[in-house]
């Protein structure tokens, strides 16, 4: 099932990102190369541990997956998608980098770039909502990361504040590509509105209506989730929420969301344009970048800028 070895140098596709250590990309690794530390994350079929490379003393987050459980739960396809999509995206600063994959008899190991400053969700919970400068800056980082994913033919399908981590400079690192859709090469350049058949994956609050009505996904389904995350950064809770998934899905299909009076005026068109049932009615990423909400953002060097303080 699992054909896991070293990641070759050719998988790094983004060439203008900040310098990354590529010291041992391409070399074969195993558990003996690392000192494993505490558990920093608990997924549904994985544990994420902090680990230090014995030679370089660099810290990594190592995702450890139990092979027997993955086979039993029919998740082989998903762990391979996670590896393959991360390899395609390796090198873009807004996406957690995958340095190595290897396995032993019982487990698979993904050696990931370590994002020590936690998840976006924890900051929204801590501060209840984020200030306008932070929302604008992080919305821009998320949007340009989505733009890069889409240009590589990857639809994330589960964007949410839990999957947006922060590195030591408080720049974002998007993670959790286990439910991504990898488009065939001829569709990588397709318009954002093009839909593809999709099984139900994702998280109720962030799911786009096309998945509910047509079991279809498009690049613009990530734009829908992006708008939900931006809304949550400003308001404190996602736009479509409720006691159970049935209530949430009904609200999504009815486009039932509140626009609190205190919302900054420039953000309102972003929600009104994205929360549309038809994928073709939603703006493209290029169009979104020109919304007045993003006025003043310097898109080219976002990941080299100092993020505004969250508090
Ligand atoms: P889920 O079942 O929630 O989808 P999962 O099995 O796909 O989880 P991840 O979401 O990739 O696992 O990771 C679980 C948690 O581990 C994350 O929410 C995060 O807190 C932590 N984590 C994952 N990757 C990193 C990283 N590169 N650096 C720091 N922490 C990480």
Image (cartoon, grey):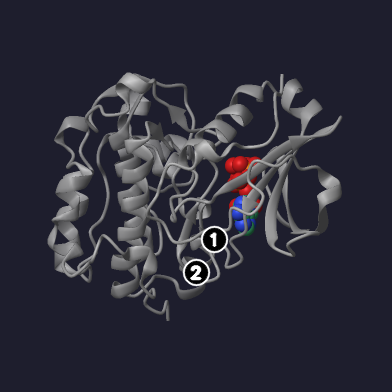
Q: Where does the N terminus fall, quadrant-wise? A: top right
Question: Which residue occupies the foreground of this view, 216 or 33?
Answer: 33
Q: Residue at x 40, y 64 (%)?
A: 236
Q: Position of residue 284 (x, y in %)?
A: 19, 41
* Residue 225 can be seen, yes or no: no
Is label 2 in a helix, a strand or a loop? helix
Mark 2 crowdedness (10 Å alpha carbons): few <14, some 14-19, many ≥20: some
Mark 1 crowdedness (10 Å alpha carbons): few <14, some 14-19, many ≥20: many
Mark 1 CB within 8 Å of ligand 1: yes
Vertical relation: 57 (above or below) 258: below
Q: Is residue 150 left or right of residue 88?
A: left
Quadrant of res 69:
top right
Q: Residue at x 13, y 55 (%)?
A: 290
Q: Where does the C terminus fall, quadrant-wise? A: bottom left
Q: Is residue 70 left or right of residue 181?
A: right
State the residue position of label 2.
Answer: 123
Quadrant of res 71:
top right
State the residue position of label 1.
Answer: 119
Q: Is residue 292 left or right of residue 213?
A: left
Q: Position of residue 283 (x, y in %)?
A: 17, 42
Vertical relation: 11 (above or below) 258: above
Q: Residue at x 78, y 29 (%)?
A: 67
């Amino acid at each position: 099932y699992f054909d896991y070895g070293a990641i070759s140098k050719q998988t790094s596709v983004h060439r203008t990102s900040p310098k990354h250590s590529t010291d041992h990309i391409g070399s074969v690794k195993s558990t003996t190369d690392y000192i494993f530390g505490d558990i920093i994350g608990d997924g549904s079929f994985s544990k994420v541990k902090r680990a230090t490379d014995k030679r370089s003393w660099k810290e990594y987050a190592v995702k450890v997956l139990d092979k027997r459980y993955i086979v039993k739960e029919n998740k082989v396809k998903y762990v391979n998608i996670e590896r393959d999509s991360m390899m395609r995206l390796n090198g873009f600063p807004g996406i957690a980098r995958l340095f190595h994959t290897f396995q032993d008899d019982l487990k698979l190991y993904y050696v990931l770039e370590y994002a020590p400053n936690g998840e976006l969700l924890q900051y929204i919970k801590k501060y209840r909502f984020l200030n306008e400068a932070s929302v604008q800056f992080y919305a821009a980082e998320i949007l340009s990361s989505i733009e890069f994913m889409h240009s590589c033919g990857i639809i994330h399908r589960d964007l949410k504040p839990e999957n947006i981590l922060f590195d030591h400079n408080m720049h974002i690192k998007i993670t959790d590509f286990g439910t991504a859709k990898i488009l065939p090469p001829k569709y990588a350049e397709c318009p954002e509105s093009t839909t593809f058949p999709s099984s139900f994956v994702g998280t109720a609050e962030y799911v786009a209506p096309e998945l509910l009505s047509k079991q279809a996904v498009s690049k613009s389904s990530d734009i829908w989730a992006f708008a939900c995350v931006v809304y949550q950064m400003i308001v404190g809770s996602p736009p479509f929420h409720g006691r159970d998934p049935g209530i949430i899905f009904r609200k999504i299909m009815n486009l039932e969301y509140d626009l609190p009076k205190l919302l900054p005026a420039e953000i309102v068109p972003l929600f009104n344009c994205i929360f549309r049932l038809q994928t073709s009615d939603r703006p493209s990423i290029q169009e979104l970048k020109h919304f007045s909400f993003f006025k003043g953002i310097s898109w080219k060097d976002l990941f080299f800028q100092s993020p505004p303080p969250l508090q």
